[in-house]
Amino acid sequence: MGKGSGATGRWGVAEWGVRFPRRVLVVAGVLSVLFGCAASGLADRLSVGGLAASGTPSARAEAWAARYGAGSPELVLVVRPVSARNALDGPAVRVAGRRLTERLAAEGGVAGVRSYWAAADGGGPPGPRGPLGGDLARGPERGRAAGLRSLDGRAALVLVDLEGSETDTARTAERVVPRYTGEVGPFAIRATGPAWSLAQSTVQARTDLLRAELIAAPLTFVILALAFRSLVAAFLPVLVGGVSAVGALAVLWVLTAVTDVSVFAVNLIGALGFGLAVDYALFIVARFREEQARGRGAEDAARASVVTAGRAVAVSAGTVTAALAALLVFPFSFLHSMAYAGMVVVVLAAVTAVFVLPAVLVRWGSRVTALDPLGRFRWAPAPTIGGDSPLWRTVARAVTRRPVCWGAACMVVLAALVLPFAHGRPGLADERILPAGAASHATADLVRRGWGTSAEGTLVAVLPRVDPVADRAALDAYGRRLSALAGVRGQATVTVPATGRYAGGRRVGDGGAYTPEAGGGAYAPGLGAAATGRVVRGTVVTLTLRPDPQSERAAALVHAVRRLPAPGGALHLAGWAAQVVDARAALADRLPLALGLIAAGTMTVVFLFTRSVLIPLKVLAVAALSLTAALGGIVFVFQDGHLRSLLGDFTVTGTIDMTIPLLLFSVAFGLSVDYELFLLSRIQEYYRATGDNTAAIVHGISRTGRLFTAAALAVAVAMGALASSDVLLLKELGVGLALAVVVDATVVRGVLVPSVMRLAGRANWWAPGRGSRQPETGPRGATPCYDGPSVKSGHIEGTGSPLDSGLNPGALSPDLDRG
């Protein structure tokens, strides 16, 4: 293109793939090899966890609880004597239990152990000291008071505190659990707990990633081959997806040096990278073949594809990246790492599509259309993927004739999909994200049955300003008031170590031992203040919950405890139920900011792309409606428990993990705007040349309908392959994204958008200072790529090429060449 061309001024760099195809391909190949080598060591640097909110009151309370040895255990062992004749308090079993506890406490990465069994003398004085200075065991009465013995008296719990981050604890569990489960001495031992659940989820996610790729890759290739009617062209999205995914993994390897990157980010890169690669390659290759059908050579056709579809790819990538960046405002490290992974793969997919793909198209030329898998069975030449679709043209004409009826019908369908979202309940992921047969999940169910509560069913109230000796009267009164609260009565048992156990406002038993220290007192539920090597003033009060920690009853209990004045005036409430409540509050606090950032970024990008005020508002409204419908779908399926027979068995928890709707909304919103931009580019091209709003809508739908159908089907397969995962988080994400893409590319893009644009009429293109400006055909004679009777041939400035306005950025925006 000529130097003075507006296109060259804006797209000269992007044309490198057209002008220097061999160099670009060599550089891309070398970089891919280097990226692959860097990414090979990524697996060992990935983190697990990050699903709970950080910086919340309950997160800070966990640190307080750890000072008293009352933190939530990372590993829970269910220990049952192999022989039914052996009782938990029998001499031989007690000795074996103490030895098991000592062995566990000596393991590397173990911070301490809380066990049921007493010392050999049966209790009284504190048991033998562990390597960290804490009591390895208390008397049997202490074990019963702490709820370490099952209700039937046949099994006991061993609670293991692990050192380090969630990733460290998961790796320790992965090393320790196999040595302490199964038949160990006189015991049959099973394991659960957050660390073991994370370890198993990590292994399962890696297995599921491979399975998803084995499912998605061949199916998507078949869809693309049938859509493009060429085995050669079907390979191109695979090329774009592969290069961008390898590059993204290499960038994540670098990011692991400065921040945590979740193991699940790899699954997102595979699904999102491949899905976007399909989109971008479809749009560019379809435009390339369309230009070739008009008689242009490979270089000119590739240049036209870069300037038109390539420009939309760049704008789309910016929109998707902005939507993913909004995840960074939420206090979930899991979402942060997913945002980083998503942004990286989106940018690399766009760069690969705009630079590398045109180079391949120039080198291959007409061979892009080779090897039609069904060619020998066709009676007539098949239409190109970006060509006019009689079916979608018929649909578009019907919608534009009666936009009110069709729009209302579409709204009814979307409203039916949205309806379940009204009763959606956000929660946090626990061991139930794994299949019921997984060891950690099955053992957690055993704890619920055997102990009447879950392994996470304890709230710990830290009272740092209370002396358990001097303030016994205040603690006794607090225990009575706490157990008499409306939210607590009948739902929890309160244990105050210095005074006793309480239920219904009455003292019902002993509270267990506490460890008096010089200068004050510190209650140690397991390890005590001695474990930390320092004297800690204060005490803790425990509440053993009966309801599910993620239930509304548990949330009401948390609020009731926090409202009650505590002795000393300071209260830090730790526990899983408190974390769920605080995570929901953090989500509600940050959600308006995230939505505002997404809205502002999208409206700015779409306005610059269309120079319209109304269209960006419509894009936001339609995308939000269609995505809320997708969220309603996952509530209907996973929270309410429908369609389990189709999606594989999963545990219905009555909640949806709160990170999944956020991630789903960001990714699907970007993809929704992605389709919208490509549709608008077609409609706007036609409208700028003809001024006929209705005809432009029909033309845009008919030209992109077949393309969107193929893209949506391919992306739905790529994303939906995650639904085969045995990890519930990935299953929810895969189903949600697949549903969002299919609904958006068919019902929304084919019916709702044209009906809204038809009703808006010329107001679609209004902008301040321009009013309802007439479309420009301009002195260049530029016209859009369409097959109507008014098609003209034009020339791009600075060239003698007889190229139509497919090469003219001014056809996409009248102000583009003017800067």
Image (cartoon, grey):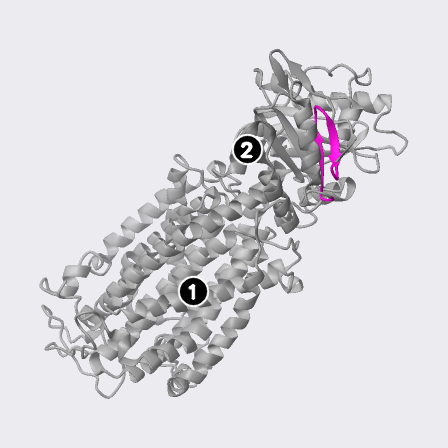
- Residue identified by numbered label 2: 61
Horizontal side, residue 789 vs residue 334: left or right = left
**Residue 364 placement, left or right of 633:** left
Q: Secondary structure at mark 2?
A: helix
Query: Residue at 54% across / 69% down in the picture?
Result: 417
Q: Is residue 289 left or right of residue 564?
A: left
Q: State whether residue 491 is above or below residue 670.
A: above
Instruction: Name the image quarter holding the N terminus.
Output: bottom left
600 vs 142, left or right, is left
- Front residue of this view, candidates 233 and 688: 688
Q: Position of residue 346 (x, y in %)?
A: 36, 54
* Residue assigned mark 1: 624
**Looking at the picture, which amino acid does disc 1 mark?**
Ala
Q: Residue furthest right?
A: 85
> Where residue 518 appears, x then y in whole percent?
62, 11
> Start and end of the magenta stretch?
490-505
Is residue 813 depicted above or below 631 in this figure?
A: below
Q: Is residue 364 visible?
A: yes
Single out the residue that lies furthest toward the top: 518
Residue occupying the point 67% across, 40% down: 457
- Number of numbered discs on residues: 2
Q: Residue at x 53, y 40 (%)?
A: 49
Q: Decide whether residue 497 is among the magenta residues.
A: yes
Near-viewer residue (748 or 274): 748
For the residues labelled 1 and 2, the Cα–Cα distance comes to 37 Å
| Circle 1 crowding by C-alpha within 10 Å: few under 14, some 14–19, many from 20 | some
Q: Nearer the viewer, mark 1 or mark 2?
A: 2
Is 232 covered by the magenta stretch?
A: no
Sequence-wise first label, 1 or 2 = 2
Residue 799, by quadrant, is bottom left
